[in-house]
Amino acid sequence: MGCAIAYFLASDPDFTGRILVLERDPTYEFASTTLSWGGIRQQFSTPENIRMAAFNIPFLKSAHETLAVDGEGPALSIREQGYLFLASAMGEGPLRAVHDLQIAEGATVEMLDPDQLARRFPWLNLDGIAAGSFGYENEGWLDPYALLQGFRAKARSLGVEFQVREVEAFERRGKSVVGVLLTNGERIGAGWVVNAAGWQAGALAATADIELPVEARKRMTYVFDCREDLGDMPLTIDPTGVGTRPEGRQHMGIVSPAAADDGPGTDFDLEYDLFEDVIWPTLAHRIPAFEAIKLSRAWAGMYDYNTFDQNAILGPHPEIDRILFCNGFSGHGIQQSPSAGRAVAEWLIHGAPRSLDLSAFSYDRIAENRPIYEAAIV
Ligand SMILES: Cc1cc2nc3c(=O)[nH]c(=O)nc-3n(C[C@H](O)[C@H](O)[C@H](O)COP(=O)(O)OP(=O)(O)OC[C@H]3O[C@@H](n4cnc5c(N)ncnc54)[C@H](O)[C@@H]3O)c2cc1C
């Protein structure tokens, strides 16, 4: 997010200031971005999230050219193999309602009944499945690290300064944030400070007595080999919430626990019980070819989880000046980085986003206790 905002700011001819990106770990080893699945989709239930996708996806598809530096663009390796949400009889009604909204917003998605699913995806076991919603274009996944490096390199080429520094606290004077205090004892003053600290954003906001409902939530990714070639399978989400997608010749599995069991993530330790007890049995039932698989590796990453409503928090604070938020993306921040980055840049330059009205995601909704209910959370 920090690199995306810096890029959109620096490339706007109306911007006349200086931009400094502070990053404590230039390897990005524990950043959500590096550990993400890179899924891209239009299939959301909130109109603003669908509208963001309408900008994000064309931007990502042309990023190789747009973000090129000296003729070299990032290779995002976009795999447009689609995104398939499966629904049980109970989930069919809500899935169809959301589908109608997506169609009205211009998304390229289709509802499939079990016969159509069987023809299109012969590797699926349709036991307990009443319908599927398939994003047949503009959906799939990309290489998130390449996107991060693409934004970063382009921003640098446009004059953005990057420093390896850790922010200890936001410096607040009365009702304004006036800069940052670094762990090395330095202070950097700023006209505006943007919080783009990912899963650490809530803790950082607290240093200026700002309540920001963003916490780390651990998500395990499991990578496994399957002997059978399932062709160009989409990123597939079972009604239980267990998800899988191909990664080269391998496959990956993930699940988000129910909100009640989803406590703050405190470590990156590998956990295998979740794979043995939940992910593998669920996937083996849904995709019988996965009965005979071999786990090859796993990693832990943190969602930048918005505990209030699992959606982005974008823009200013209603009472505290000179700080902007770009936080809380909760599992859909890679794909939203173009529209979120552009919106924050427009806030800084023009005082409000111009290209797309994203006021629904402002901090005001938290202060006023108006959560956004996004049904398509993975
Ligand atoms: C397993 C997993 C799967 C995901 N799948 C998807 C997906 O399919 N599609 C999708 O769109 N999104 C997905 N996401 C979510 C997505 O990865 C995040 O929403 C997104 O990467 C957030 O970007 P960010 O820049 O805000 O945070 P980060 O990438 O975490 O970056 C924050 C940066 O801030 C730095 N930082 C933090 N605190 C400080 C400090 N005090 N001083 C200096 N620097 C600091 C960190 O070092 C880090 O580099 C997934 C996430 C995970 C973990």
Image (cartoon, helix red, strand yellow):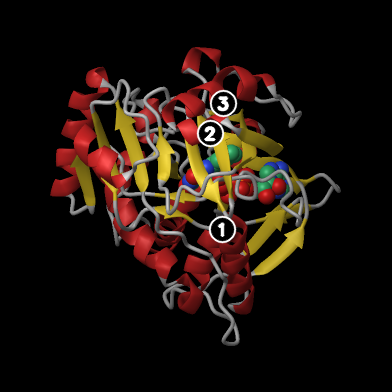
Question: How would you rate the neighbour count of disc 1 (Cα within 10 Å): few for under 14, some for 14-19, many for 20 or more?
Answer: many
Element under disc 1: loop
Front position among marks 2 and 3: 2
Q: Quadrant of residue 30?
A: top right
* Three-letter residue code for mark 1: Asp
Q: Quadrant of residue 174?
A: top right
**Count of number-bearing discs:** 3
Q: Quadrant of residue 287?
A: top left
Residue ID for mark 3: 280
Badge 1 or badge 2: first in the primary sequence: 1
The CB of the residue at mark 3 lies under 8 Å from ligand 1: no
Front position among marks 1 and 2: 2
* Three-letter residue code for mark 3: Trp
Would residue 374 be visible to someone looking at this image?
no
Nearest to the observer: residue 85 or residue 63 = 85
User: Mark 1 and mark 2: span between their CA atoms?
Assistant: 24 Å
* Three-letter residue code for mark 2: Phe
Q: Quadrant of ligand 1?
A: top right
Would residue 13 be visible to someone looking at this image?
yes
The residue at the point 33 percent across, 36 percent down is 85
Locate residue 36, reporting x and y percent: 58, 45
Badge 1 or badge 3: first in the primary sequence: 1
Question: How would you rate the neighbour count of disc 2 (Cα within 10 Å): few for under 14, some for 14-19, many for 20 or more?
Answer: many
In this view, the residue farthest toward the top is 260
Is mark 1 in CB contact (under 8 Å) with mark 2? Answer: no
Q: Is residue 161 above or below residue 266?
A: below
In this view, the residue farthest toward the right is 184
User: Mark 2 and mark 3: span between their CA atoms?
Assistant: 8 Å
Residue ID for mark 2: 290
* Disc on res. 143: 1
